[in-house]
Image (cartoon, grey):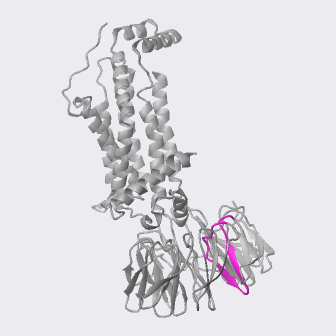
Amino acid sequence: MWQTIIIQPMTNLLLWIYDVLGHGPHMFGLAIILFTILVKLITWPLNASQVKGAQAMQELQNDKEWQDIQKKYAKDKEKLAQEQMRIYKDRGINPFASCLPTLVQFPIIIGLYQSITRALSATPFDMLQLARTVYPFQNVENIIPLNSTFLWMDLGRPESIQMFGLAVPTLAIIVAATTWVQSKLTMPTSSNPNDQTAQMTKTMSIYMPLMLGWFALNFASGISVYFIISNLLGVVQYAATGRANWSNLFGGGKKAAVTKK
Amino acid sequence: MKTKRFLLFFLVVLGAIILSACSGQPLANNWPGLAADAKHAYISSGSFIYAVDVQNGKEVWKYPAEANNKILFYANPVLTEDGQLLIGSAGTEHPFISLDPDTGRENWTESFTGAKGAWMASPLVINETIYAPNTDGFLYILDLNGKQAADPIQLGGALWAKPSSDGTLLYVNSLDHHMHVIDPVQGVVNEVIDLGGAAPGSPAVGAGGVFVGSFASTVEFVQPNGQHEAIAKAGNWIWGTPSIDGETLYYADLDGIVYSLDLASGNQNWDAQPDGPVVASLLIVGDQIYVATESGSFFALDRDGKIVWEKTPGGKIYTSPVLSGDLILVAPYQADFALAAFDAEGKQAWTFAPEK
């Protein structure tokens, strides 16, 4: 099931792009970049709904009625939950709308990792599996084995550059940095000290760069290329929709005003 | 809100676990390598190399004593005339080592660590020189003490196949679709031949040249001067080394078809499709042709392509069967045991399963 729905189409799409590009050196890296752009375009509406959902939740945190019920039912969790659900319903807010794109991202990341590993075929067994994965229309005899070189990297292995006798994981650093930048730009500002959404986003903006940086450190560098391009496109998307919170990066931004009803 | 926070945290942790599982240390996975002499069979099966007594199927030794997930062995080990067992690691660390075939102890004080890639191919030993192809695209040239005897020769593409020699020249296949004809004395590449597809198997020496199968689904005959022609076709990829017996060439493909070709006339004698795709090279002993299939079956065919007997050791068989004394050794992958021995009548002598 996972194989048929995720791995096989992804692997074939990557191979097809690689073939169209001329399957030479650096082309598999370019194929991953184009693949990432394609994924971002497909998931654009989902990401847009995430931004919208996050903003709606943010505005809710600063809403007087919302803050009132927090105080009023502070000791009655069940009633508080009921009231919260009522407000969600009244305002047409889906509290999980901002989580959906994250949910979609995980199968893509895992599938992409497995597709890259399979496409690069480090062992004869991998190559045999690849042969069974490829759709009949692909010119598989010509395109395999794939050239895993991209810039200074071997896309099938974790990346590092030798500097001053040390193996510096430059890609892992870039992955962590771009993830941090993206999360900072999307982090809402809040004047409410009890704003749980803001607290959660702040926590995630610390953990996510560390986690993705760790992935980049330990896994095939092809997945790091995906992370970096995906993060940069995320920034572009936020900037294009005018929702990027540049004040979080450069400081001096205004605090969100408390909405009164 | 707490539910949402918990959900996000859960997703992050789940993603970390799943991706960690994807990496699946050890990173590489492959079918085992196999070699044998009159006393022992040697199986390279991931973290360990096992020596098995061919008389009774009992383990004699294993190397190393403790698994190291950075060191993995999948190539067919190679025995040298001076009593060494050579193999390189296909793991994330890739030392090339020499073991004592009787004890499993390391022969060299330092293993060779000059290669950048994994060792999927077996080395070829001629006189006192080791020619070791690596996935980094270089052919390394070592002496029998593991020291570099000459500069490595850059061929390009990952090298998965053991080189062949006609006594004068070396023939090295690459996954980059090329065969390289090398003068080992001068250390130069004389000819580079485009095979039209990747060639993971070794060339077979005979008829004044070499025969090589490839993913172009053809058998190419290559002469020492580089002249070459496709002499036979198959329906699918040819993975194993073709087998030459007198005037007849045998080869098999991933469609599971075994072909017999008359070399004198160039005509096909017969083809047979026993059962399942064939990756392993065919083994010819006496009047029988032994065929191991991905379906986990092991066949003996006669010289007319008729099935003499069939056994089903189980698992999937990709490793080429080898001969040790009167026994044919088969190493299935993902089976209940790692090695099985059959006599010429198909009677199973023993099986070997490593202790867990």
Q: Determine whether A226 is above or below B27 in the image.
A: above
Quarter assignment of residue A190: top left
Q: Position of residue A127 (x, y in %)?
A: 51, 63
Quarter assignment of residue B52: bottom right
Q: Is residue B174 visible?
A: yes
Q: Position of residue B41 (x, y in %)?
A: 67, 77
- Tell which of A228 and A240 is nearer to you: A240
- Tell which of B301 and A154 is nearer to you: B301
On the picture, is B343 further left or further right than B247?
Answer: right
Q: Position of residue B196 (x, y in %)?
A: 44, 74
Quarter assignment of residue B183: bottom left
Quarter of the image with the C terminus of chain B is bottom right
Quarter of the image with the N terminus of chain B is top left
What range of the chain is rendered magenta? B276-295
Q: Is B55 in the magenta?
A: no
Label total for image: 0
Q: Look at 46% across and 53% down and name the residue there.
A: A11
